[in-house]
Image (cartoon, helix red, strand yellow):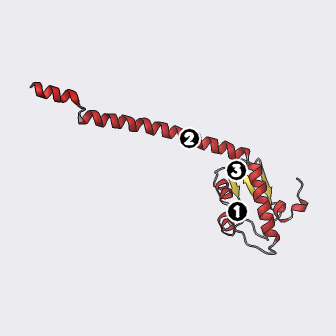
Amino acid sequence: MNTRRRNRARGLTLVELLLTIALIAILAKMSLGALSRARKQAKEQTLNIEFWQFANDMRERLTSYYDSQSDYPAWTASELHQRGVFTDKDMEYLRFDKVVFVPFSSSDPDDKYVITEKSGRAGFQKKSITHPQDFPY
């Protein structure tokens, strides 16, 4: 009987070990969830601040691409990325849920908005891309 008590006092039981592991897993999950939310919020704020810079960069790239085209179909952002017009960073920005790129073709009216925020507060019309000299900055 003394031997049994001595052995038990030296180590952890399987139940104690499993409870410890479960507690650590719960704490890790809670902290990783908070970290993920904080990262998403920081990225959202950064993209909101940099909207005009990204939009201007994309407008310039689209302008140089469409200047070399006389007639063009409505390319999606993915197709423009494959053609080298949009960079990987542009694509990351366009995946942001508050930004919309609307494909446009040569037959679309010039007042069609092609890069906008979903809130509708900011954006660029097709005219600023296809006729940048006529667009008031």
Name the residue beneath numbered marker 2: 37
Is residue 123 visible to the viewer in this orientation of the structure?
A: yes
Picture quadrant where residue 67 is located:
bottom right
Q: Give the Cα separation between the discs numbered 3 and 2.
A: 21 Å
Q: Nearer the viewer, mark 1 or mark 2?
A: 1
**Which type of secondary structure does the marked residue at label 2 adopt?**
helix
Q: Earlier in the sequence, mark 1 or mark 2?
A: 2
Question: Looking at numbered disc 3 in the image, what kind of residue is underneath it?
Answer: Lys
Which residue is nearer to you in this view: 39 or 112? Answer: 39
The numbered dot on residue 118 is 3
**Which type of secondary structure does the marked residue at label 3 adopt?**
loop
Q: Which residue ends up furthest to the left in the rendered image?
A: 1
> Which residue lies at the image location 76% right of the left edge and 47% below the top edge?
121
Where in the figure is residue 126, as x and y percent of width and height?
Answer: 80, 62
Where in the figure is residue 68, as x and y percent of width and height?
Answer: 81, 72
Q: Earlier in the sequence, mark 3 or mark 1?
A: 1
Question: Looking at numbered disc 1 in the image, what kind of residue is underneath it?
Answer: Phe
Q: Which residue ends up furthest to the top in the rendered image?
A: 2
Question: Looking at numbered disc 2 in the image, what kind of residue is underneath it?
Answer: Arg
The numbered dot on residue 86 is 1
